[in-house]
Image (spheres, helix red, strand yellow):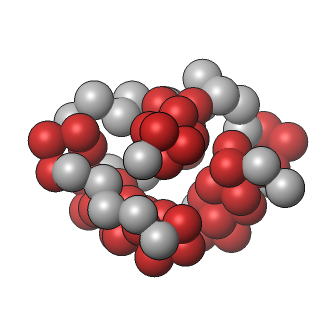
């Protein structure tokens, strides 16, 4: 399972969505995530992937694909 698929699995569970409805271009607004949801999600992803996402990078994460790309680069 690649990074994107693992992120989709976490998001689909957290927001009660089907993984097939998620794409690289899916935005936080489309899944109904507010800023608190995003902070919680980032924290969970940091634990899952054993990375530290810089606070200043979070503002640039507009889509699921953005998150997957950043995690792969860390």
Left or right: residue 2 versus residue 48 is right
Name the image quarter holding residue 37.
Answer: bottom left
**Residue 6: x, y in percent?**
71, 58
Residue found at x 63% / y 54%: 7
Tell whether 55 sits left or right of 31: left
Considering depth in this image, is 1 or 60 the residue closer to the camera? 1
Where is residue 17 drawn, in percent x and y? 72, 55
Q: List x then y, in percent, for residue 68.
A: 56, 41
**Residue 43, image quadrant:** bottom left
In the rendered image, residue 42, in percent from the top left (x then y), is placed at 38, 60
Q: Residue at x 36, y 34 (%)?
A: 61
Identify the image quadrant of residue 41.
bottom left
**Quadrant assignment for the N terminus:** bottom right
Q: Relative to 26, is 72 above or below? A: below
Instruction: Look at the image and tell me whether residue 12 can be seen.
Output: no
Q: Residue furthest left?
A: 56
Question: Quick check: can you spot residue 18?
Answer: yes
For the point 72% across and 38% down, the residue is 22
> 4 above or below 61?
below
Would you place residue 54 above or below residue 21 in this image?
below
8 or 3, which lies in front?
3
Describe residue 39's horizontal placement relative to residue 56 as left or right.
right
Specify the farthest residue to the top.
25
Front-lying residue, 53 or 24:
53
Numbered disc total: 0
């Amino acid at each position: 399972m690649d990074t994107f698929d693992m992120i989709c699995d976490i998001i689909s569970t957290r927001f009660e969505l089907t993984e097939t409805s998620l794409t690289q271009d899916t935005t936080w607004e489309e899944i109904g995530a507010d800023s608190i949801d995003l902070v919680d999600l980032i924290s969970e992803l940091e634990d899952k992937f054993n990375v530290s996402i810089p606070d200043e990078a979070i503002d640039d994460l507009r889509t699921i694909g953005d998150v997957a790309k950043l995690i792969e680069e860390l």
